[in-house]
């Protein structure tokens, strides 16, 4: 085969400049080729994705459009979407490419809710570590997602922005670059980024809604203790609202004004309502096999688009089962 001294696009390489054969360069060339073969559409009015594509690609059969969707060839604002009823909004860009999506890494104990160039939002199940200092521990949120992003970007990076206890569950947010990490960490500091929790505690709480204020300090055993003495540690404030009550347990919606280590666990132990399953912080009820702690809502401002973004997940069935028995 004859050698040609041309780069993609027909431009000649300057003398003495070696061809870039790195993974990043090959991926860039692949993406440019795929983009050149893509069809792009702008959404004019609200619609479901499949209906929009059937109208925009009127010369393509329904089954063919469904196949294109199922193979990950459709991207909405740069994000691959396969769901037929995905809601589109005016101004969004829909791109249909010829290249099928690469096989996904198998994820255990977590599900990706959203991914773009800056962040990944997942739902973590109870029993899965968020992160581990041990290199031998592969079954963590962080390690699994690193394997996922390295399928498409060998040099991809990941930054955990909040950690959930192993036996807790719910929405987790991770950044894919330094700029996104710094922007969202600033939001945690100033209160722009927020979480809402569903918490199952022992006993019947006395009030339908209340605010708990205390000061936290950590012992040598790494346990946090809550004190009601002003200035005796780090200031911590949480708010709760009663959702359901039974003879031995209460289901609460909880938000915090402060973002302290093990804050919710320590404060509920202090007021006499430890979280169900949390033996370290005073729980004595039967073990559910997990903590009665779940992040059901996460809100933050996207570091690139500037849009306020909210993700929600359902309450674990094990929480609700306790009320069906009573």
Image: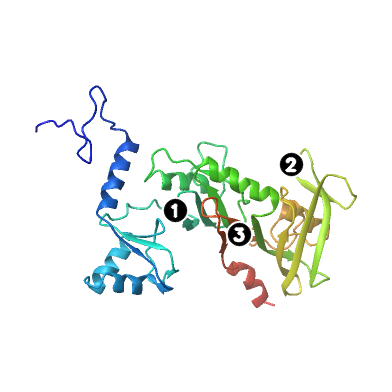
Classify mark 3: residues with Cα within 10 Å, few (<14), some (14-19) or many (20+).
many
**Quick one: 22 or 265, which is closer to the camera?**
22
Q: Residue at x 28, y 32 (%)?
A: 21
Residue 298 tag number: 3
C-alpha distance separating marks 1 and 3: 21 Å
Residue 107 tag number: 1
C-alpha distance separating marks 2 and 1: 31 Å
**Mark 3 or mark 2, which is nearer the start of the sequence?**
2
Q: Is residue 229 above or below residue 313?
A: above
**Quick one: 22 or 71, which is closer to the camera?**
22
Give residue 325's position: percent from left, percent from top. 66, 76
Say which element carries label 2. Answer: loop
**Mark 1 or mark 2, which is nearer the start of the sequence?**
1
C-alpha distance separating marks 2 and 3: 27 Å
**Mark 3 or mark 1, which is nearer the start of the sequence?**
1
| Residue 95 appearing in the image | yes
Say which element carries label 3. Answer: strand
Q: What's the coloring here?
A: rainbow
Task: Check the picture and name the quadrant holding the C terminus.
Answer: bottom right
| Residue 127 appearing in the image | no
- Residue 257 in the figure: left or right of residue 206: left
Q: Is residue 222 above or below residue 299?
A: above
Tell which residue pokes out farthest to the top in this image.
Answer: 16
Look at mark 2 in the image and give the residue it sits on: 222
């Amino acid at each position: 085969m004859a050698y040609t001294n041309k780069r993609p696009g027909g431009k000649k390489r300057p003398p003495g400049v070696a061809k870039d054969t790195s993974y990043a360069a090959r991926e860039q060339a692949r993406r440019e080729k795929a983009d050149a073969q893509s069809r792009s559409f702008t959404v004019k009015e609200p619609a479901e994705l499949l209906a929009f594509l059937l109208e925009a690609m009127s010369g393509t059969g329904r089954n063919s459009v469904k196949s294109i969707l199922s193979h990950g060839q459709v991207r909405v604002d740069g994000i691959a979407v396969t769901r037929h009823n995905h809601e589109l909004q005016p101004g969004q860009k829909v791109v249909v490419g010829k290249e099928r999506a690469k096989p996904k890494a198998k994820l255990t104990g977590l599900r990706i809710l959203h991914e773009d160039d800056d962040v990944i939002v997942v739902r973590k199940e109870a029993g899965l570590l968020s992160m581990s200092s041990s290199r031998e521990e592969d079954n963590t949120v962080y390690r699994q997602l690193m394997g996922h992003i390295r399928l498409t970007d060998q040099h991809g990076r990941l930054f955990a922005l909040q950690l959930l206890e192993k036996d807790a569950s719910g929405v987790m947010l991770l950044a894919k670059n330094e700029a996104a990490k710094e922007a969202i960490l600033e939001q945690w500091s100033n209160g722009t980024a927020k979480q809402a929790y569903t918490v199952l505690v022992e006993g019947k709480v006395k009030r339908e809604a209340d605010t708990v204020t205390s000061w936290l300090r950590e012992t040598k055993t790494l346990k946090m203790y809550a004190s009601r003495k002003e200035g005796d540690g780090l200031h911590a404030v949480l708010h709760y609202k009663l959702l359901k009550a039974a003879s031995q347990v209460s289901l609460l919606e909880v938000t915090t004004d402060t973002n302290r280590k093990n804050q919710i666990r320590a404060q509920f132990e202090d007021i006499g309502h430890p979280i169900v399953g949390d033996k370290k912080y005073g729980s004595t009820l039967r073990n559910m096999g997990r903590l009665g702690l779940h992040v059901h809502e996460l809100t933050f401002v996207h570091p690139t688009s500037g849009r306020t973004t909210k993700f929600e997940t359902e309450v674990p069935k094990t929480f609700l089962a306790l009320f069906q028995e009573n």
